[in-house]
Every structure is written in C-alpha cells, then in structure tokens.
Amino acid sequence: MQKGLFNNMAPLLQILLVVAIAVISMFVFTIIGFLILIPFYGVNEVMSAFTFGNTEIIRFLQITQSFALFVVPAVIAAYLFSTKPLHFLGFEKPNNTLIILSLILFFVCLPMISFLTQFNDSMVFPEFLKSLEYKMRVTENRTNELIFNLLDTKQPFVISVNLFMIVILPAFGEELFFRGTLQPLLCKLLKNNHIAVWLTAFIFAAIHLQFFSFLPRFVLGVMLGYLLLYGKNIWYPIAGHFLNNFISLVVFYYYRYTQPDIDPFNSPADEFGTLMIVGSFICVGVCFYIFHRLIKYREDILIAH
C-alpha cells in the first residue's frame, strides 16, 4: 500500500472512504470470525450465540468486531491519507506530566459522570413517545444484561480477556478511530476545531446505540476530544479512556465480589453527594485549564529556543 495515496482527497470523500472501509472490514472480519468458530461450536450454536448467550462466542466476536470496526479502518486511513501514518494518528512522544494529568482528569470526573449517568437514565419521554421510550429501555436493558453476563465470572483467564475486551481494546481502538482519524478529518472539513470535537463526541456516543447512557458518553467524548486538540497527541486520550474503562471494570468486580446481591450497573450512582459532584465539575475545569496552560508553556519554550 502506497503511503499517502489519497493525501490530497477532499476531506468529505476521505471521511466517506473511512466509513466504507469500516463497513467492509466489519463484514469481512465477522465472516472470518464465524468461520473460525464453526469447527469448534457448530453452525447452529455460533449463529444463535447472541440469542442463547454463549459468552465464549460473544466475547470472541466482540473482540474481532471491535478490532475490525475501529483499528483496521484507522490504520488503513493513516496509510492512505498521509506519508507519515503514525504522525497522522497522533502518535508522538508523550509528556509524562500530561499523561499523569490526563489520568487525574478522568479520575476526578467520576462524580460528574456518575451524576450525568443518573440524570440521563431518569429521563422520561412525552406521552406520545412512550412506546419509543419503552423500546429503547428494553434494548438498553438487553445490552446491559449481555454485558453483565460477559463480565460476571471469577475465572482469572476470563477476567484477563474481559480486561482486554473492555479496557485495552476500546481505549486503543476507539481512540485511533474517533480521535486519531475522524476528529482530524472533521477539523479539515468543517474548519472549526471545536465543532469537530463536539460532533466527533456525538458520533462516539451515538454509535453505542444506548440512549439512556448517551449523555455521559458524549461528555467523555468531548473531554477526550479536547485532550487531543490541546495536546496534539493520541496518547493523552488513550490514557484517559483506559482509566475510565478500567475503573468501571474494577467497580463491577468490586460489587460482584463484595455485594453480589447488588447490580453494579445501578448501584454507584448515589454514592457521591452534591458537594462532591459540584467539586468534580470544578476539578474537571481546573484540570483542563492546567493542561492547556502546560501545553502553551511548552510551546512558548520551543519558540524561544
């Protein structure tokens, strides 16, 4: 593959090409995944995995499809659109202080995200949209039930696979696709970095197809987008995304081991008081201000030298 083959292609066409690559990659890797599984489980069990809940099959397909949908299109796009693929994706040497600050940011935002999660989940539709709300609630509950079944284990090996599936792969793959590829292309297309950040965050939240957890995902997407915009380095949103997912996984297993009668998806929302939630909003703002100032300070030093 020739590097930078479509470097001069219009941004809109580049975005459409990325979407096409993602669809094709998803289709091809899904077929390959099924073909790999059929000799071990048989056609009927593989085809009915999502109905009858064979977690081994679902876990394998989830990893395969995540890789196909996010990693593959981002890597191919980087080679097609730039002669420096790693630079295109934002892979630069990170600053350790900014990595730590990114981690702190996603730690102090926990009460804020918890509040937004609770607020989003409590939304009630108007009477004429009640049937739509019911269908969306059913879909959301089924998705949560599926995730619960995938995570609910005490086997060390399966937990390690879940760590890769829930924490490592999304932090790396989703950031490559959304922040490393889609956001810069939208910046070129829209010629407005802030609109690109918010639009990318909207798509990031919407693609999960879970309306009643859309708001916290959207806010997280905005935060990740600004880490890339200000830091100009993909490692900062990857670090933040990793910590967010890791904490979620730790919280799940904490409740399953210590309080198995409690549903981990519903329990943590009320743990934070009003003062802590307000403090979380303030701390997020302060962290972004410090992050931005550190970037500006480093740039001023480079200019001076």
Image: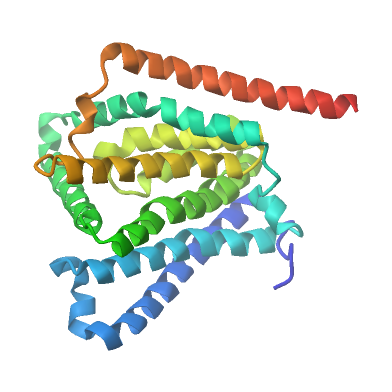
Q: Is residue 16 above or below residue 277?
A: below
Residue 173 in the image: state x and y as whole percent: 49, 55
Q: Residue at x 68, y 63 (%)?
A: 79
- On screen, residue 73 above or below 120: below
Viewport quadrant of the N terminus:
bottom right
Q: Is residue 221 visible?
A: yes
Q: Which of the 4 image quadrants contains residue 69?
A: bottom left
Q: Nearer the viewer, residue 225 or 11?
A: 225
Q: Residue at the spot x=34%, y=63% of the render? A: 62
Indicate the position of residue 245 as horizontal and vertical percent values: 39, 44
**Where's residue 235, x and y in %?**
60, 44
Q: Quadrant of the C terminus?
A: top right
Q: Is residue 100 above or below residue 275?
A: below
220, 243: nearer the viewer: 243
Q: Is residue 195 visible?
A: no
Indicate whether 235 appears above or below 298.
below
The x, y position of residue 6, in whole percent, is 70, 62
Instruction: Please tell me which residue is depicted at 28% across the width and 40% down the height of the picture.
Output: 251
**Relative side of 10 to 71, left or right:** right
Q: Residue at x 25, y 61 (%)?
A: 155
Q: Which residue in the rendered view is the most extreme toward the top?
A: 275
Instruction: Please indicate whether residue 239 sits to the left or right of residue 256 in the image.
Output: right
Quarter-of-image position of residue 15: bottom right
